[in-house]
Image (cartoon, rainbow, N blue to C red):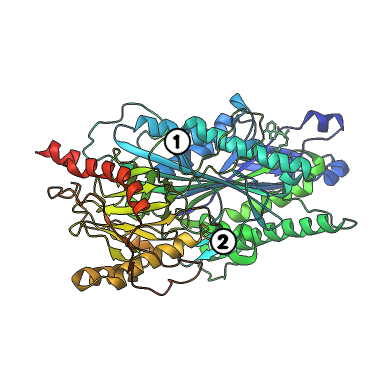
Amino acid sequence: MDSKVTVAVRCRPLMPREERAGAEAVVVLTDRQVSVGDPVELAARGSSPILGRNFAFDLVLGGDSQAEVHETLGVPLLRHAWRGLNASIFAYGQTGSGKTYSMTGGDGDERGIIPRVCEGLWDAADAHSATHETTVEASYMEVYNERVRDLLVPTGRPLKVREHPTKGACVPELTVVRVRGRNELAELLSVGSDARATAATRGNARSSRSHAVVSLVVSRRRRSGSSEGITEEGWWSGLDAPGSCTSTIRLVDLAGSERVAVTGTDGARLQEAKAINKSLAALCDVVSALAANSRKKKAFVPYRNSALTWLLKDSLGGNAHAAMLATVSPSDRHFEETVATLKYAFRARRVKCRATVNLVEDLPEEVLPSPPSPAVVVRRSSPRRSPQQPKQVRWPRLTNLNPDPAFAGAAWAPIRDGATVLGCTAEADCVVRGSGVAPRHAVVCCSSAQGVVVLCALPGAETHVDGNRVAMDEREATRLEHGSRVVLARRLAFRYEARQDESLDAFDATDAWHAAIAEVSQKGSGAFADEFRGLSQLDDEEASQPARAASPDPPEYTTARAPDPVPRVVVGGGPSPRKSAPRPLTPPRSEALGDADLDDLAAAQAQLDAILGAPPAYVASRQ
Ligand code: ADP
Ligand code: MG
């Protein structure tokens, strides 16, 4: 659906310090107009500011409270997101005009748009919890001097921006946290804001020179069979929202738009000034080109001229409802900057966006490690502690591979000693959601003392390791080696990681997904293989959709038969996949385990026997 960019102008009051310095207010706001008086003309002719330059806008915010600003911009954004549309807000204006105050704000009633949007999301998630499951994933980055930095795990190391063949620009190493509650989201954002503020003190007012981007991916899935209505009233009232959908929310606090004087500055400042001017000039060029295109011209849109515009391409002119909040100072000392901001915002009014609903079929398959092991833990034990927290990780583990870089490598399931059951219901040790995944799909048995990990497929469930089907009928287990690819139900892929390995970075997880699916296709045979080959030829978008004929009922189980006391182990080895294309396929080789291995596996095997000996719980409940 086409819509114009919403442009709102907010003018802050004169600060006490400005008043003390004799500054005068030259900005006058009326219902839908902003007028700025030229101080030189005013001094010469004594005319009223209303006779100065006038700009008409849809939304003009003067003495409005933070709550009112949220009602004007934050609530429409939430309503778009709840309907499955991507939505974004950009704050633009000179340093000191109120961008951060409007977006982040302070405590209590001073809370800005970002915390209020987060609260609004949780209000809706709670009110709909009987009928929908809502998940929120958050990331927070800063673009400073054309470099991207993570604000949730602020190592200070610049992160690479990569071009994904279908998804566009992405930052594969950026920390993405699956948020588990209202307080955790607020805490995460305060960690990010602290990190930005800390850098600002160290780095000479850096915060005014960096762009800060909060991204929230909100997914809601209708619970099957739910019929309970929503009773509470809220910002979602009267919305005709689809049952299951996903949306990306972007909240952007841009660097100060004032011209930075470059004369007499040292090398670092000069570099910084150039970078800010470059990215804001690039943003200006992009907005101009988009505005021209909205008038049917076919202008080239230079997204790739800066990291900022490249990263935010989709939110600027693509599949997103965009709003710009232009903040201005009323002071006569800022006349030129205020006029420049208003001219810029006026141009943005012409830009059109085309947002489409992201139904849940577009969601990549998701993997939820069972609580209480979140994929990434970023936590602050006390509000004043250092925000820098390492990722909490464990090995051995199964790391999620995914065609979508936003998900690839972002979640993993720890493998404990004994048996770890993978399946689609909450009873599994590792919950794997996706079409075709059985409630109890596969078991991973681990003996950390011997460093042996094997995988057994459970009856009726399709599982592949390095492209080879793990067949229950032959009562085989397959040994997992560091880097082995495990594919459940044909499309849910993991990499087994026995230990920390820097070379298996997050971006690899996208390539590795393609490699894992392709090798299943190439090694299979007959109709089964044909189906795989078809699948691997699909582009990312299609491949990430659940199978069309997915039945709401779990698949039928055959009666479980206990396997031999000790599984025969087929080594599924071979080198782990590296950065580039799928590795050449090698046939599996068989290898007998030593006695010590077998002894140690016996304990794990006993647990496996217990699992396989009893029919799966849900079969019992259906009889
Ligand atoms: P920016 O992020 O644009 O550089 P800030 O948001 O940091 O500017 O605002 C600069 C100062 O002005 C802060 O002290 C802030 O509290 C104050 N301020 C900004 N907007 C308002 C407003 N609408 N009402 C009251 N104070 C404001
Ligand atoms: Mg600021």
Quarter-wise, where is residue 263 in the image? bottom right
* CB of mark 2 near ligand 1 (< 8 Å): no
Does residue 83 appear in this view?
Answer: no
Q: Amino acid at mark 2?
A: Ala
Q: Secondary structure at mark 1?
A: loop
Visible in this render: residue 302?
Answer: yes
Nearer to us in this view, 482 or 99: 482
Image point (84%, 59%), residue name: 267
Viewed as shown, does residue 415 lie left or right of 325?
left
Does 98 sit above or below residue 436? Answer: above
Whether residue 8 is situated above or below residue 499 in the rendered picture = above
How far from the left and from the top, in percent, is residue 277? 73, 58
Q: Residue furthest front?
A: 595
Q: How many marks?
A: 2
Q: Amino acid at mark 1?
A: Arg
Say whether disc 2 or disc 1 marks the residue closer to the N-terminus: 1
Query: In this figure, which residue is indicated by the disc labeled 1?
Result: 180
Return the mark for residue 291. Answer: 2
Residue at the far right in the pictured view: 264
